Amino acid sequence: MNQPILQAEHIQMTYQKGSDMSQAVLKDLSLTVAPGEFLTIMGPSGSGKSTLLNILSTLMKPTAGDVTINGRDILNMNDKDMANFRNHDMGFIFQNYNLIESLSVAENIGLPLNLQKVPTKLTRERVQKVSALLNIQDLLKKYPAQLSGGQQQRVGAARALVHEPALIFGDEPTGALDSQNAREMMQYLMQINQEKLISILMVTHDAFSASFASRILFLTDGEISGELIRGAKSREAFYQEILQALGNFDE
Ligand SMILES: Nc1ncnc2c1ncn2[C@@H]1O[C@H](COP(=O)(O)OP(=O)(O)OP(=O)(O)O)[C@@H](O)[C@H]1O
Ligand SMILES: [Mg+2]
């Protein structure tokens, strides 16, 4: 097998709450993402999805465990290497968008290229291209405060994709979108996954969004409790299978 794009081993996470009120949110969790894979993690609210994604995407350090991305031990990198690595190899689409208020939409989207010192002309071209795909080309001159939640989320997605990273992380990337926009966002993620072989690791509680993935891991109380693989099934058939699996979990 090819080297995994991401490998997490024996991850534990405990948030300290006072002296002895600590709570284990993740319990000895291991997973791998294969190159070109579209993996979705599902689970109820509070099951630890965001905690796990924040750890895997280098935004938070676990209490114990190892994380390797593209063969690099990300928990023991210095700050400069880490910043470089994030700028080149990773894209993030998060629940709360994290757009910079003082920058225009075009500047927000172009930020990862700017940080890589890509020439202005090339940056402008890439920003145009990704904006057209996400249907936000009319918003480029606006500022985040002038946009709806769904528009901000698409701008956040454009910024995550503009530098065509090896791996994209998404925390509820369709969370603020209506069903039509959610479908478009997922189709776009599926397209870049299939055409550009960009790996995707996404977290959602939404079965429809999850049905675009190639594999689903279910998280319950900080542990992996199940797995579904899309295989040759259609998205619609996979969606039905996910709904059924969720039904079984409720019982
Ligand atoms: N910064 C924090 N400090 C203390 N506890 C936290 C912190 N962040 C999360 N938790 C706790 O960890 C558990 C898992 O939270 P997490 O945000 O990872 O869940 P989630 O599966 O993403 O939920 P949701 O679907 O609601 O986004 C919850 O019990 C939560 O209260
Ligand atoms: Mg969450």
Image (cartoon, rainbow, N blue to C red):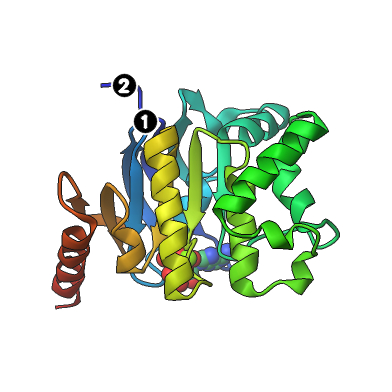
Which corner quadrant of the image does residue 205 belong to?
bottom left
- Spot the residue most to the right: 102
Q: Is residue 195 left or right of residue 244?
A: right
**Identity of the residue drawn at 37% across and 39% down:** 194
Q: On screen, 95 above or below 223?
A: below
Where disc 1 sits, the SS reads loop
**Identity of the residue drawn at 40% across and 63% down:** 204
User: Disc 1 marks which amino acid?
Assistant: Pro
Q: Is residue 211 left or right of residue 195?
A: left
Q: Nearer the viewer, residue 194 or 59?
A: 194
Q: On screen, 132 above or below 113?
A: below
Which corner quadrant of the image does residue 100 belong to?
bottom right
Considering only order in the chain, which callout, 2 or 1, is on the residue closer to the N terminus?
A: 2
Could you say where residue 162 lies in the image, as x and y percent from the top left?
A: 62, 41
**Identity of the residue drawn at 35% across and 22% down:** 3
Q: Which mark is residue 150?
A: none
Q: On screen, 121 above or below 138?
A: above
Q: Label 1: which residue?
A: 35
Asked if marks 1 and 2 touch (Cβ < 8 Å), the reply is: yes
Q: Nearer the viewer, residue 160 or 8?
A: 160
User: Disc 2 marks which amino acid?
Assistant: Asn
Q: What is the quadrant of the C terminus in the image?
A: bottom left
Q: Label 2: which residue?
A: 2
**Identity of the residue drawn at 51% across and 24% down:** 72
